[in-house]
Image (spheres, rainbow, N blue to C red):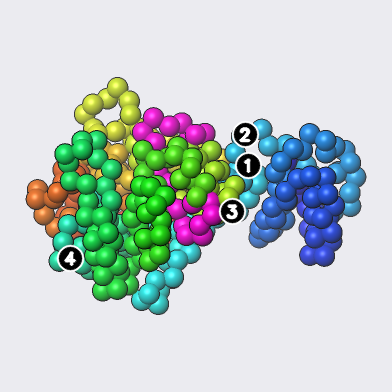
């Protein structure tokens, strides 16, 4: 249930009204927007009468939320959520709320020279975040599984060398203690419905990049976000990375229609992964441009100095030079749409 508060209500009046509601056995989340204050009621609201609420002097309107996701619902939080991350270089990066966040780097961390070299190149091109895999979930047990803890150390070294915040994937709860210096924790498509892991991340206060499962509906993605938010962590970035269809030309089918739907249904920022979606490096630039045009709040792109020699997903990685050209184009897109780089 959503309660919109009339303009002019004081903070004290809202607090007293909130306490009154909580006495009825529900949890109340307060969202103060630019033009509207909203109270989101979570729990059993069946015994709360709308007519009684509307009779209260502070209440402008009451809406019963039909969707199963509450905290992730835009009705619950009318204004766009903006994720803010302070880099060790003194710069503050934003994703959402009119800001575009670009994450770039190799699929997998391989060597110190590789990850620092890519980090320097993507930062120079304008990326705000360094992505790289230390722990890699692979379909085959015989494929390269990542460098593990050594890979994390190399990512942190690249972070110190460039100042870029780092994004990397968490595969299991026991790894969480190793992620203290990671700025954004990525939950991969295979773990999108690992509810035990999602609950644990709800107790964490780091931003979470939540990738859509390759067979997940939009509602299932939002419910996965709800698991994290129910634990108290609302710093979530949704990621469309392609879904499985009958089409076999590309690795997955990039569902760009998910971007405006998610933006309409939820206040959480939405980014797109054109690398995993297509699996083909030559398709990454056009799909990246299409994603920004569709309203995405950012991108996560695979960049490697020598894609043909990459230990993981080289066929979908673009070179630093291609990435620099893409960024130049995307900056023009951002300017046309009055979006902040």
Looking at the image, is mark 2 or mark 3 earlier in the sequence?
2
Q: Answer yes or no: do the residues labelled 2 and 1 have beta carbons within 8 Å? A: yes
- Of residues 204 and 340, which is closer to you in this image? 204
Per the image, is 165 magenta? no
Per the image, is 203 magenta? yes
- Of residues 269 and 333, which is closer to you in this image? 269
Q: Answer yes or no: do the residues labelled 1 and 4 have beta carbons within 8 Å? A: no
Looking at the image, is mark 1 or mark 4 earlier in the sequence?
1
**Residue under numbered circle 1:** 70
Q: Is 217 positioned to the left or the right of 72 in the image?
A: left
Task: Locate residue 86: give its quadrant.
Answer: bottom left
Looking at the image, is mark 3 or mark 4 earlier in the sequence?
4
Residue at the spot 31% in from the left edge and 32% down from the top edge = 253
Q: Is 96 positioned to the left or the right of 60 in the image?
A: left
Magenta stretch: give its range: 201-220
Q: Answer yes or no: do the residues labelled 1 and 3 have beta carbons within 8 Å? A: no
What SS does tag 4 mark?
helix
| Extreme residue in the bottom direction | 90
Q: Is residue 75 above or below residue 128?
A: above
**Residue under numbered circle 4:** 112
Q: Answer yes or no: do the residues labelled 2 and 4 have beta carbons within 8 Å? A: no
Q: Position of residue 199 (x, y in %)?
A: 52, 46
The numbered disc on residue 232 is: 3
How far apart marks 1 and 3 lie (CA) works out to 13 Å
How far apart marks 2 and 4 lie (CA) works out to 47 Å
Mark 2, other Cα within 10 Å: few <14 / some 14–19 / many ≥20 = few
How far apart marks 2 and 1 lie (CA) works out to 7 Å
Residue at the spot 56% in from the left edge and 40% down from the top edge = 265
Q: Answer yes or no: do the residues labelled 2 and 3 have beta carbons within 8 Å? A: no
């Amino acid at each position: 249930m959503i309660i919109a508060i009339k303009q002019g209500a004081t903070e004290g009046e809202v607090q007293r009204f909130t306490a009154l509601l909580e006495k009825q056995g529900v949890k109340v989340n307060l969202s103060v927007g630019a033009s509207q204050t909203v109270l989101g009621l979570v729990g059993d609201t069946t015994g709360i009468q709308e007519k009684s609420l509307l009779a209260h002097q502070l209440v402008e309107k009451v809406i019963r939320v039909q969707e199963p996701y509450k905290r992730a619902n835009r009705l619950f939080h009318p204004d766009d959520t903006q994720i803010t991350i302070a880099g060790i270089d003194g710069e503050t990066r934003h994703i959402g709320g009119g800001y575009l966040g670009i994450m770039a780097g190799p699929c997998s961390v391989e060597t110190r020279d590789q990850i620092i070299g890519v980090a320097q190149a993507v930062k120079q091109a304008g990326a705000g975040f360094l992505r790289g895999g230390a722990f890699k979930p692979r379909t085959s047990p015989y494929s390269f599984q990542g460098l593990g803890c050594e890979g994390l150390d190399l990512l942190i070294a690249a972070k110190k060398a460039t100042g870029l915040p780092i994004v990397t994937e968490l595969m299991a709860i026991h790894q969480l203690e190793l992620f203290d210096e990671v700025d954004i924790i990525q939950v991969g498509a295979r773990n999108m419905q690992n509810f035990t892991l999602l609950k644990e991340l709800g107790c964490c206060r780091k931003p979470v990049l939540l990738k859509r499962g390759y067979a997940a509906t939009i509602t299932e993605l939002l419910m996965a976000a709800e698991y994290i938010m129910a634990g108290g962590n609302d710093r979530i970035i949704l990621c469309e990375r392609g879904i499985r269809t009958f089409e076999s030309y590309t690795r997955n089918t990039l569902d760009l229609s998910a971007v405006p739907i998610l933006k309409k249904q939820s206040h959480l920022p939405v980014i797109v992964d054109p690398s995993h979606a297509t699996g083909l490096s030559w398709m990454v630039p056009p799909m990246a441009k299409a994603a920004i045009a569709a309203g995405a709040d950012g991108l996560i792109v695979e960049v490697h100095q020598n894609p043909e020699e990459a230990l993981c997903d080289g066929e979908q990685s673009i070179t630093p030079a291609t990435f620099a050209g893409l960024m130049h184009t995307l900056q023009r897109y951002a300017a046309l749409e009055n979006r902040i780089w």
